Amino acid sequence: MIDRRTFLKLSAGALVLTAAGALTGCGGMNDRPKVTIDGVVFMCEAPSMTVTGGSDHAVRYCPLFAIQNDTGERVILKPEDITGTFTDMENNVYPLKFIRNELTVEPHSYQEYGSSLKFCLESENRVPAKYSDGTFIMRVAYHNQTAVFRYDGKTITPSKE
């Protein structure tokens, strides 16, 4: 059995380690694919859902997306700044359009978009259900550069254009 003083010291130490882990992002979005543009880190993880239904329905791509703004200026992404494509197994290409509102991240802050209500792209044209498997490429334009996240159904590969 430990005395009260030892218990309090151990508890304080655990709190310090927990806080340090949170600050360094241990187990958080920092472990996910990312692209940095002018002090802004764009992070993307495999989609929570990719939905098709019946025959000839829209394809939806809704990945977990986050922005770490390490700058002194507000980051604003308009819907047209976020685009994508879906390429099916027959090499048919379908444009994807961001279907949510603009994203705003204040200076020196972090914002995560983890649901289809906050972050989702949808095919502009109908896609035959038999072509529901394929590759998604999402592009995020910022400061005349583009963060690119390619999802092959298994992993996301980040790059910058």
Image (cartoon, grey):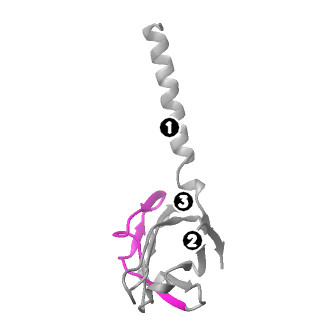
Judge whether 72 appears above or below 123 on screen.
Answer: above
Question: Residue 15 magenta-drawn?
Answer: no
Nearest to the eye among marks 1 and 3: give it.
1
Front residue (pair 150, 147): 150
Disc 2 element: loop
Q: x, y percentage for residue 77?
A: 45, 76
List the residue tagged with mark 1.
Answer: 19
Range of residues picked out in magenta: 93-120
Looking at the picture, how far across and down is residue 157, in whole percent?
A: 64, 69
In the image, which disc is placed on residue 148? none
Q: Quadrant of residue 135?
A: bottom right
Which residue is at a point 48% across and 65% down the rendered structure image?
65
The residue indicated by pointer 3 is 70
User: Is residue 119 found inside the magenta-colored segment of the image?
Assistant: yes
Q: Quadrant of residue 79?
A: bottom left
Q: Residues within 10 Å of mark 1 (few under 14, many from 20)?
A: few
| Earlier sequence position, callout 1 versus callout 3 | 1
Between 89 and 22, the one nearer to me in the picture: 89
Give the residue pinned by disc 2. Answer: 153
- State the CA–CA distance, disc 2 to disc 1: 34 Å
